[in-house]
């Protein structure tokens, strides 16, 4: 637990700084969407490319852990759908509960894994991201299509195009090709991409802090509490049990549990806005899970380390 707390402290310090910068208007509110866009489209793919292109996969066994994480998201989606008759909520609010339970902030967890577990943690989280981003997006877009408020029904080709052109997936795939072919291991391109990647995580964390919305915590507190419980309590248990069943042990087990215990992703708010979800409930969930994960993440990882 000490290891994770030590890694979380600088992460949450930077998140807090982002909130202060926006709150005090030292960085104007109009600038934050551009910063978020820059990290998502440019810097984060560069980071993932740099990590994967130089990884020594001969020393890393990742298959069962990646498979466990992928199945974890599927199982969480099935659980939330099974609970729908018991959740007293309209369609848009249910989609926000689903997103809250099934989406994760992969870039925050990437930063945490890098600090706590080094290169192997970075590589494992990067590979989990490239496998699970399509799964999670298909799940949440389908649910929003069925129960969202605005009636916009994206067709299958549009959804698939958004997934295959996702910058994070493209960064991971390009890094995998470069690793396989031995390209860009050194030289100017490697140095430029690595330098861009170094800028990604601080800006991501600042943007997460800037996006915290404490007023949204007052929106439908029962549904918010349910969503937070599903994400921060049930999901780590589900991911851990699946990983254990798959034979995942040690640091890899802790990392898979960390994925399950991740706070919600700010991109869930954008999707709720576009496809008719409950935006305020989603904003509240992202804020609540980000803050509470400071306590729940170390506890979940500590239990996984004790068991594994």
Image (spheres, grey):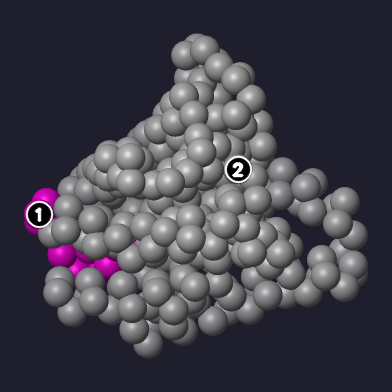
| SS label for mark 2 | loop
Q: Position of residue 248 (x, y in %)?
A: 15, 58
Residue 278 falls in which quadrant of the image? top right
The mark that comes first in sequence, 2 or 1, is: 1
Q: Which residues are magenta?
A: 245-259
Q: Which residue is mark 2?
A: 278
The residue shown at (44%, 79%) is 295
> Disc 2 and disc 1: Cα gap in Å?
36 Å
Say whether residue 87 is left or right of residue 185.
left
Question: Is 182 a magenta residue?
Answer: no
Count the marks.
Answer: 2
Q: Position of residue 150 (x, y in %)?
A: 64, 25
Quadrant assignment for the N terminus = bottom left
Q: Which residue is mark 1?
A: 245
The residue shown at (19%, 69%) is 250
The residue shown at (37%, 77%) is 298
| SS label for mark 1 | helix
> On screen, 116 above or below 180?
below
Say whether residue 169 is left or right of residue 45.
left
Residue 267 seen in render? no
Residue 20 falls in which quadrant of the image? bottom right
| In the foreground, 204 or 83 | 83
| In the foreground, 61 or 203 | 203
Chief SS of the magenta region: helix
Residue 130 falls in which quadrant of the image? top left
The residue shown at (46%, 24%) is 146
């Amino acid at each position: 637990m000490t290891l994770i707390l030590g890694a979380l402290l600088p992460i949450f310090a930077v998140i807090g700084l982002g909130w202060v910068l926006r709150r005090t208007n030292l960085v104007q509110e109009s600038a934050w969407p551009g910063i978020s866009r820059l990290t998502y489209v440019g810097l984060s793919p560069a980071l993932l490319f740099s990590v994967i292109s130089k990884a020594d996969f001969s020393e890393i066994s990742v298959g069962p852990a990646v498979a466990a994480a992928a199945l974890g998201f599927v199982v969480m989606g099935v659980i939330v759908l099974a609970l729908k008759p018991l959740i007293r909520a309209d369609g848009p609010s249910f989609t926000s509960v689903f997103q809250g339970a099934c989406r994760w902030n992969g870039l925050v967890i990437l930063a945490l894994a890098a600090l706590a577990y080094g290169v192997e943690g970075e590589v494992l989280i990067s590979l989990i991201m490239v496998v699970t981003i399509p799964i999670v997006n298909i799940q949440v877009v389908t649910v929003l299509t069925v129960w969202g408020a605005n009636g916009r029904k994206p067709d299958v080709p549009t959804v698939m195009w958004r997934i295959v052109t996702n910058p994070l997936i493209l960064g991971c795939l390009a890094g995998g090709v470069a690793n396989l072919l031995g390209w860009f291991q050194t030289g100017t391109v490697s140095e430029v991409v690595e330098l861009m990647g170094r800028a990604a995580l601080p800006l991501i964390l600042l943007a997460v802090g800037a996006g915290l919305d404490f007023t949204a915590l007052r929106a439908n507190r029962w549904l918010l509490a349910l969503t937070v419980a599903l994400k921060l309590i049930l999901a780590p248990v589900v991911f851990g049990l699946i990983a254990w069943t798959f034979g995942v042990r040690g640091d890899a087990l802790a990392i898979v549990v960390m994925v399950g215990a991740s706070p919600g992703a700010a991109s869930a708010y954008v999707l709720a806005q576009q496809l008719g979800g409950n935006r305020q409930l989603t904003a509240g969930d992202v804020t609540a899970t980000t803050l509470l994960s400071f306590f729940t993440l170390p506890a979940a990882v500590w239990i996984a380390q004790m068991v594994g």
